[in-house]
Amino acid sequence: MPDDTQILGRCPDCGERIPTAWRLIDYERDDGTEGVWAECPACEDVVAPE
């Protein structure tokens, strides 16, 4: 079960903190770094946490 105390980052739209439980998908970018898409619990948009 995900640990809700861990934070992925903040929503680039509204600034709300996004817990790991809201993670939707992990992916690898062309440069080899990890990317994440998550749903913002406040504005309900799918975003790349910052």
Image (tube, rainbow, N blue to C red):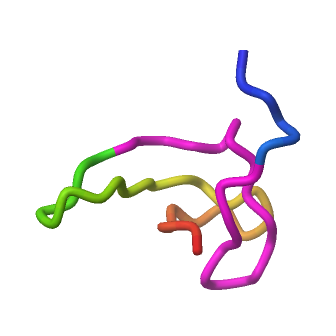
Magenta-colored span: 7-26
Percent across and percent down for residue 10 are: 70, 71
Return the x and y of residue 16 as percentages of the image width and height: 80, 72
- Looking at the figure, which quarter contains the C terminus? bottom right
The image quadrant of residue 15 is bottom right
Residue 42, percent across and down? Answer: 79, 65
The answer to which quarter of the image holds residue 13 is bottom right
| Residue 15 vertical placement versus 30 (above, below) | below
**35 or 16: which is nearer to us?**
35
**Quadrant where the N terminus is found in the figure:** top right
Residue 36 is covered by the magenta coloring: no
> Residue shown at 66%/74% (left/top)?
11
Residue at 57% over, 67% down:
49
Is 20 on the left-hand or right-hand side of 16? left
- Residue furthest to the top: 1
Q: Is residue 9 above or below residue 12?
A: above
Q: Residue at x 75, y 48 (%)?
A: 19
Pick out the residue farthest to the front. 32
Number of labelled discs? 0
Q: Is residue 50 left or right of residue 27?
A: right
Q: Nearer the viewer, residue 2 or 40?
A: 2
* 16, above or below 13, in the image: above
Out of 45 and 1, give the one closest to the viewer. 1
Q: Is residue 7 left or right of residue 45?
A: right
Image point (45%, 55%), residue name: 37
Q: Which quadrant of the view contains residue 32?
A: bottom left
